[in-house]
Image (cartoon, helix red, strand yellow):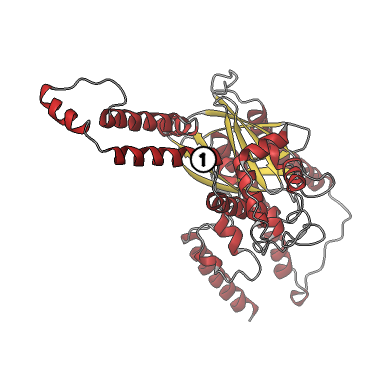
């Protein structure tokens, strides 16, 4: 009876194993896309197969002993205390296994900390990116290119995750795994990362890269990568860093070298400058702001143009005056409210919630707050310089003046607040001095 059940069990097990083997097993460690991640994957598989072989040997011997030496067969147990030969074997084998694991592991760690090429020469880094962790966002500074930006959970995910939002999270693309500004790096480039934190310990982790590094306040950790294949790769903070630890994803876009060069030019404003120059040139050719050559058959048209009515000239002057007045008055209330809502939903919503109710006492309500509806200078000081000992960060060193001005304007005129104040970027710059 036991033999029949055993045979049936092996048949069912074999069937299940063949089914699993034929399917794509999505829970294994990824091979990754960097040079280093391949070494990590190979190391992982080496240890896995060693464990599988040990497991088969141990459980095989155990089950054989159970069935072959069971009491019903009348087997008499052997009488001995120990075997020196067996003890030497089961001591030597684990030592050899540990050596087999330690050698490639040590080589991989050395490659991560002190990268070298196939000839054993130190690898030269082509660019450096500084990564700073905040609660609960990342900042990327391109030290060679001279610009940087914040990377925060996208507004659609941030709003959908709120209690009572009524949004089906399955309808949100890359829910909790997408950001407004991804880290962009070029392919086929040696990239050095310098990691630190502005508040608590974070950990920057993209599984496809094969490593993670802690971002520690007051310290700078270093890592590097070399990605050959363009694509989008996602990760998360891997160190518990507060209530919204699970809401600070990482997105890295790897571009071809030519596409990356275009992206850098766009970030530095070169693309905008070129476009503006084209527009100015077209305007000059159209309206004659600069001297241009005039054909003989255009003289009649120019003479007719000179006969424009005085009324039209007055209208043009009024339009110009209105434009100058609007420029002098700064951002309009509508512009500030629109920009402020966007910034609030990405930078402030996590603590103060979508309706401004907050989570007192740690994160106070903005609706009817004495700070928000009170003295404007005090609120600007709180937002720009933060509040020591609380979760209120000094956004003056994080966000541009335009975003801070718009956000303060928004909070003073939303959530039932109707102060009517209109804060300009110049007010923020003055507060920073």
Q: In terms of depth relative to the viewer, which is nearer, 149 or 127?
A: 149
User: In the displayed image of the protein, which residue is found farthest to the bottom?
Assistant: 1
Q: In terms of depth relative to the viewer, which is nearer, 320 or 365?
A: 320
Q: Quadrant of residue 201?
A: top right
Number of numbered tags placed on the structure image: 1
SS assignment at label 1: loop
List x then y, in percent, for residue 392.
Answer: 76, 48
Q: Quadrant of residue 314?
A: top left
User: In the displayed image of the protein, which residue is found farthest to the front?
Assistant: 310
User: In the displayed image of the protein, which residue is found farthest to the left?
Assistant: 297
List x then y, in percent, for residue 55.
Answer: 68, 56
Is there any visible trace of residue 377 in the rendered image? yes
- The residue beneath circle 1 is 33
> Which residue is at a point 63% across and 29% down the rendered structure image?
111
> Which residue is at a point 70% across and 65% down the rendered structure image?
63
Q: Is residue 308 above or below residue 288?
A: below
> Which residue is at a point 49% across and 45% down the rendered structure image?
232
Q: Is residue 393 above or below residue 128?
A: below
Neighbor class of circle 1 (other Cα within 10 Å; few <14, some 14-19, many 20+) is many
Q: In terms of depth relative to the viewer, which is nearer, 321 or 333?
A: 321
In the image, is 410 to the left or to the right of 22? right
In the image, is 352 to the left or to the right of 342? right
Q: Quadrant of the C terminus?
A: top right
List x then y, in percent, for residue 246.
Answer: 67, 55
Q: Quadrant of the N terminus?
A: bottom right
Q: Is residue 8 above or below residue 131?
A: below
In the image, is 340 to the left or to the right of 189? right
Q: In terms of depth relative to the viewer, which is nearer, 56 or 287?
A: 287
């Amino acid at each position: 009876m036991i033999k029949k059940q055993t045979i049936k069990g092996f048949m069912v097990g074999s069937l299940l194993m063949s089914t699993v083997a034929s399917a794509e097993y999505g829970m294994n460690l990824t091979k990754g896309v960097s040079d280093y991640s391949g070494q990590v994957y190979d190391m992982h598989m080496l240890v896995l197969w060693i464990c599988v072989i040990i497991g088969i040997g141990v459980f095989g011997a155990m089950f054989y002993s159970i069935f072959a030496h069971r009491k019903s067969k009348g087997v008499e147990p052997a009488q001995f205390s120990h075997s020196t030969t067996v003890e030497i074997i089961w001591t030597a084998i684990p030592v050899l296994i540990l050596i087999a694991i330690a050698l490639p592991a040590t080589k991989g760690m050395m490659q991560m900390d002190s990268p070298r090429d196939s000839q054993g020469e130190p690898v030269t880094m082509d660019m450096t990116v500084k990564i700073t962790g905040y609660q609960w966002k990342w900042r990327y500074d391109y030290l060679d290119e001279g610009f940087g930006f914040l990377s925060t959970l996208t507004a659609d995910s941030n709003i959908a995750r709120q209690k009572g939002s009524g949004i089906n999270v399955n309808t949100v693309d890359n829910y909790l795994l997408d950001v407004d500004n991804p880290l962009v790096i070029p392919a086929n480039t040696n990239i050095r990362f310098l990691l630190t934190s502005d508040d608590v310990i974070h950990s920057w982790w993209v599984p496809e890269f094969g490593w993670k590094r802690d971002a520690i306040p007051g310290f700078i950790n270093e890592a590097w990568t070399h990605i050959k294949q363009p694509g989008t790769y996602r990760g998360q903070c891997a160190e518990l860093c507060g209530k919204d630890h699970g809401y600070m994803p990482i997105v890295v876009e790897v571009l071809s070298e030519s596409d990356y060069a275009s992206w850098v030019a766009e970030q530095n404003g070169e693309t905008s400058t070129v476009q503006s120059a084209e527009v100015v040139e077209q305007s000059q050719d159209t309206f004659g702001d600069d001297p241009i050559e005039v054909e003989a058959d255009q003289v009649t048209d120019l003479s007719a143009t000179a006969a424009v009515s005085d009324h039209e000239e007055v209208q043009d002057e009024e339009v110009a005056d209105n434009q100058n007045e609007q420029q002098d008055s700064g951002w309009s209330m509508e512009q500030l409210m629109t920009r402020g809502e966007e910034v609030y939903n990405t930078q402030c919503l996590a603590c103060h919630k979508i309706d401004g109710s907050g989570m007192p006492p740690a994160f106070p309500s903005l609706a009817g707050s004495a700070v928000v509806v009170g003295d404007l200078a005090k609120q600007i000081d709180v937002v720009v310089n933060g509040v020591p000992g609380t979760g209120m960060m000094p956004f003056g060193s994080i966000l541009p003046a335009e975003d801070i001005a718009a956000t303060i304007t928004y909070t003073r005129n939303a959530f039932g607040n109707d102060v009517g104040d209109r804060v300009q970027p110049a007010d923020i710059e003055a507060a920073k001095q």
